[in-house]
Image (cartoon, rainbow, N blue to C red):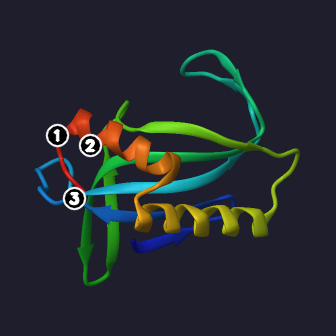
């Protein structure tokens, strides 16, 4: 994974695709903590805990930094583990496990990446 980013309640990394297009050059793979509640996009009650997100993005690296752009409604989200409150060590361990799963091509993140790969017609 390249260009790993960390924020208060999320960690993300980018994986290059083998055949980039104008809209997709990388996959953004992240682990986030959500406080749960109503999701206003689908009006469903979501649990409080950790989620894995995989989205196709266009990553551009410049001399002053990098930025990425994504299209709405692309990618998938998967609930990993329920948690009553945020724990930084747990986030770090889940992201480390996610990186290992990507490297070994195992686990739920690989299944999600396969769905996104088929949807966007790109290869990792």
Q: CA distance from mark 1 to mark 2?
A: 5 Å
Q: Name the residue nearer the viewer: 94 or 44.
A: 94
Find numbered disc 1 in the image and state the secondary structure of the residue it sits on: loop
Mark 1, Cα crowd under 10 Å, few <14 / some 14-19 / many 20+, is: few
The residue singled out by tag 1 in the image is 121
Q: Position of residue 76 (x, y in %)?
A: 44, 36
Q: Residue at x 52, y 56 (%)?
A: 30
Going from N to C along the chain, the mark reached first, 3 or 1, is 3
25 on left or right of 2: left
96 on left or right of 9: left
16 on left or right of 89: left
The residue singled out by tag 3 in the image is 17
The residue singled out by tag 2 in the image is 117
Find numbered disc 2 in the image and state the secondary structure of the residue it sits on: helix
Residue found at the far bottom of this picture: 63
Name the mark on residue 92.
none
Q: Residue at x 68, y 58 (%)?
A: 9
The C terminus: image quadrant: bottom left
The N terminus: image quadrant: bottom left
115 on left or right of 7: left
Which quadrant would residue 18 be assigned to in this image? Answer: bottom left
């Amino acid at each position: 994974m390249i260009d790993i980013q960390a924020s208060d309640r999320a960690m993300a990394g980018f994986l290059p695709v083998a055949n980039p297009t104008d809209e997709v050059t990388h996959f953004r793979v992240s682990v986030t903590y959500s406080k749960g509640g109503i999701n206003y996009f689908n009006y469903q009650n979501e649990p409080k805990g950790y989620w894995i997100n995989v989205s196709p993005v266009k990553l551009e690296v410049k001399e002053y930094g990098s930025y990425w752009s994504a299209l709405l409604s692309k990618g998938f989200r998967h609930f990993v583990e329920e948690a009553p409150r945020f724990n930084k060590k747990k986030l770090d361990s889940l992201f480390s496990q996610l990186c290992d799963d990507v490297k070994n091509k195992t686990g739920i993140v690989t299944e999600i990446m396969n769905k996104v790969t088929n949807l966007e017609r790109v290869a990792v």
